[in-house]
Every structure is written in structure tokens, then in C-alpha cells.
Amino acid sequence: MNDALRTALQEAGHTTESLAAQIGVDPKTTDRWLRQGRIPHPGHRATAAAVLGRSASDIWPDTSRRRIRDLVWFRPWQEMEREATELRWFESTVLPGLLQTEAYARAVLSASGRRTSDEVDQLVAARLARQVILKWENPPWLTAVVDEFALRRPVGGRDVMRDQMQALIAWCELPHVRVHVVPQAAGAYAGLDGPFVIATSRDHRTAVYLDTQLQGQVVSDPDDVAAILAAWENVRGEALSHRQSVELMRDVAASWA
């Protein structure tokens, strides 16, 4: 019996069957992980851990003596993301992680060349697992503003971008997902200072996530939050409407065909 996995399942309110559904494997597979102590491959370990709100090394400690820094420091923000009722997200160079395809995420996460293939596998799986919050019965409201440049940068190549644009358009069909594009003609605006995400919880607490080359930073100081909220109003004001943005996305998707 994998007691660490059993405890994680109980605390997250999951069964081996519901975990299997989230990961996309047969329930017999997850049952073997629990009752026979079998160790899943890295991608499934990372996905299962993300669904359960744990790190893979907490559940399968013998498989990774060295924790992957990218997953450890990100966990506090991931918990805030899962508790949020509203997410306001701005990206200037890439598309929001919650809306990325597997191939696009892999291209982004492997671009630096600093990560091993195993680390990239775990990070990609964790990123895709986070998308489950948008499929919940009561999902958070996601409003994303992206620079048109992010739609046109050939991340991963033409095929990857074509599939990514089609997926982005499909996300926009959900009633709780809105994507707005800042057109290239906007010129200089507050978004040039960098990307950010604003999470608002059910009890109206607000926190901000800022990304860097090393690791992200969670900000909750009232003055800092106020500054980012002002930046949000600026980037949102420069963006096209949701309908106009989707039309632009369709045009860009056609250009990648």
C-alpha cells in the first residue's frame, strides 16, 4: 500500500477512479499505484501530484531525491489558483499557461535548454493538470489579455501554432473564459513592463503572481496589488473586445495553416 498516495487521495477528496479520470488512464492503473505500490512514469506522477495538490516527490519520495525547483516554489500560487473565483491574466510574449496545448507548453518549457527531458515532462504534465479548474462545475472566471505578438510568435513551429490557435478559440467558447487581444497598433502601453496574474478568492482576497527568468513571485502587499490592478485597467483598456479578439484569432489561425 502506498500510504502517501492514499493520504493524498483522502485529503483531496479523490478516489483511484476519479484520479484516473483526471489523468486519462484506466482506473486499474491508479489502483495498482495505490495497492501494489507501483511507480507511474514521470508524466503521470506529475499530473497525479498536481491534481492532488502535492509534489510528486511527496507521494513517491524514492523516485526523486532532488525536488524540481520549478514545482516546489510554484505550489503556493497553484493553491491560490485553485481557490480563485476570478483570474485576470496578462501575457505579452506567450499564451497563458491555463490555455496552452501540450505541444505549445513543451516548446515553451524546453526553450531555455536548462531543463532535462524528465523535468520538462513533469512541468508539462503539471501545467496541463492545472487546466482542470476551468472544467469544474463551478469554475473560476478567467479573463485573459494577450498581446497580438503572442499569437504570431512561431513557438514550436507552424503545426504547433495552428493547433494552439484552434485550442485557444475553443477555450473562448466556454462562458467563463474571455480572451482579449491587444493589437500591434496599440504602441506603448503598461503591458510592456511584463506579464502578471491577479487571483481573487471567494472571500475577496487578492494576490498577484509575477513571473521572472528564475522563478515567480507571489505579491499580496496592498500597494503592490493596487499597482498591478492599475496596470490591468491599462492593458484591458488597450485590448479589443472578446468578439473582435476571436475574429483576429481566427485570422491568425488561418495564417498558420
Image (cartoon, rainbow, N blue to C red):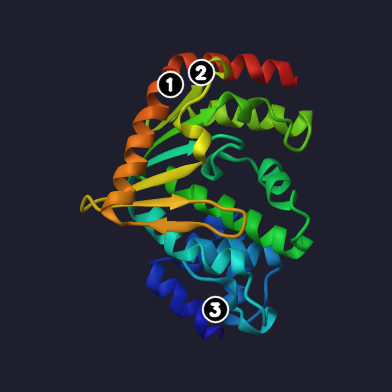
Relative vertical location of residue 49 with respect to residue 109 in this rendering, above or below: below
In the depicted view, which residue is nearer to us: 16 or 3?
3
Q: Tell me which residue sits at (33%, 43%) in the image.
A: 227
Could you tell me which residue is drawn at 60 percent across and 40 percent down?
A: 100
Asked if one can make out residue 200 in the rendered structure from this viewpoint, the answer is no
The secondary structure type at the circle numbered 2 is: helix
Query: In front: 142, or 151?
Result: 151
Marks 1/3 in contact by CB < 8 Å: the verdict is no
Q: CA distance from mark 3 to mark 2?
A: 46 Å
The circle drawn on residue 238 is 1
- Circle 3: residue type: Asp
Dividing the picture into quarters, in which one does residue 9 lie?
bottom left
Q: Secondary structure at mark 1?
A: helix
Q: Which residue is mark 2?
A: 186
Quarter holding the C terminus? top right
Task: State the CA–CA distance, disc 1 to disc 3.
Answer: 44 Å
In the drawing, does residue 98 fall left or right of residue 39?
left
Q: Which mark is residue 44?
A: none
User: Element under label 3?
Assistant: helix
Q: Contact, CB < 8 Å: mark 3 with mark 2?
A: no
Amino acid type, callout 2: Ala
Contact between labelled residues 1 and 2, with CB atoms less than 8 Å apart: yes
Query: Where residue 58 is drawn, which disc sits there?
Result: 3
Looking at marks 1 and 3 on the same chain, the residue that comes earlier in the sequence is marked by: 3
Would residue 84 appear left or right of 135 to someone viewing this image? left
Q: Where residue 145 appears, x then y in whole percent? A: 46, 31
Look at the picture and state if 188 lies above or below 94.
above
N-terminal of the pair, mark 2 or mark 1, is: 2
Q: How many other residues sit within 10 Å of disc 2, few (<14), some (14-19) or many (≥20)?
A: few
20 relative to 87 in the view: left or right = right
Q: CA distance from mark 2 to mark 1?
A: 7 Å
User: Residue at point 47% right, 13% down?
Assistant: 244
